[in-house]
Image (spheres, rainbow, N blue to C red):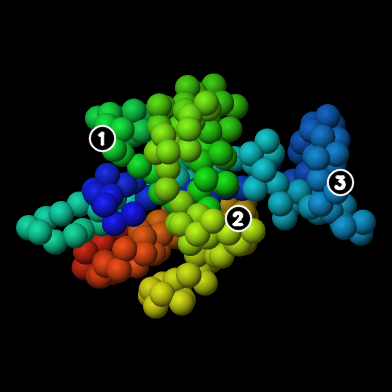
Amino acid sequence: MNSIDLQHILFLDIETVSGVSHFEELSEQMQYLWADKTKWQRKEEVSPSDYYTDRAGILAEFGKIVCISVGFIHYQDGTKNFRLRSFYQHDEAVLLREFATLLQGNYFSSTNQLLCGHNSKEFDIPYICRRMLINGITLPPILQIAGKKPWEIQHLDTMELWKFGDYKHYTSIKLLCEIFNIPTPKDDIDGSMVSAVYWKENDLKRIANYCEKDVLATAQLFLRFRNEDLLREDQVDFSFT
């Protein structure tokens, strides 16, 4: 981990919501398939409709991506700086094409480049890949992992790094930031509120702002894992300031 050039890492996070605002907007077949897919996860008293409102956003077959935020470290006069950028759209296909264009650029022409997120190997990356295919978008080379050996995959995951081989162990980024004394802003929303902010308030910028802060937290955590100093506020360039 300490041998990796920080400038070769693109940190990322995504925000997802249900594909439509209400269960009843789904086709009859999709309603049936939702009920069937979630029947073992729902408690008996929870209807497919209520469960859709709460959980559809985490399943790529029934949800959609409304924001992908990325950040990268670069050096200026020997000082680390962190720059953030967000792709956010109501039209998911447009958002994903823009992100795919980034991943196909010169920055990713080298096999040294890496993607890094928190729980990204189990959630963010698979979700992005599935939604790209659903939207008819060819996966950029860095996302084409089928048939590759584990050491050939250009992905890092701060949650996996923290597991140290303990594959049962899930630790939230909030908890890791707390125990590593990483300051995090007191946001007006958290992950559980993203769907409501999207469907009721139609506030994509608010969601993107929240997503960028999670990207910064992931980068700070990676620096802590390397026993390096955290990025200061004046070293961070947010999209929304």
Q: Secondary structure at mark 1?
A: helix
Measure the C-alpha gap from mark 1 to mark 2: 32 Å
Residue nearest the observer in this picture, 44 or 181: 181
What residue does disc 2 label? 167
Residue ranking furthest to the left:
77
What residue does disc 3 label? 39
- In the figure, residue 43 lies in which quadrant? bottom right
Give the number of the mark in front: 2 or 3.
2
Measure the C-alpha gap from mark 2 to mark 3: 26 Å
Give coordinates of residue 175: x percent, y percent.
52, 72
Give the number of the mark in front: 1 or 2.
2
Residue shown at 10% from the left, 59% from the top: 78
Q: Secondary structure at mark 2?
A: loop
- In the figure, residue 45 lies in which quadrant? bottom right
Residue shown at 36% from the left, 60% from the top: 222
Tell me which amino acid carries mark 3: Lys
Quadrant housing the N terminus: bottom left
Mark 1 or mark 3: name the one nearer the start of the chain. 3
Tell me which amino acid carries mark 1: Tyr
Mark 1 or mark 2: name the one nearer the start of the chain. 1
Residue nearest the observer in this picture, 73 or 101: 73
Asked if residue 77 is positioned above or below residue 63 in the image, the reply reads below
Measure the C-alpha gap from mark 1 to mark 3: 44 Å
What residue does disc 1 label? 107
Few, some or many C-alpha atoms within 10 Å of disc 3 (few <14, some 14-19, many ≥20)? some
Give coordinates of residue 75: x percent, y percent.
15, 54
Residue nearest the observer in this picture, 131 or 205: 131
Q: Is residue 53 visible?
A: yes
Residue shown at 81% from the left, 45% from the top: 38
- Asked if the residue at tag 2 contacts the one at tag 1, i.e. Cβ–Cβ closer than 8 Å, the answer is no
Asked if residue 79 is positioned above or below residue 144 in the image, the reply reads below
Give coordinates of residue 48: x percent, y percent.
84, 48
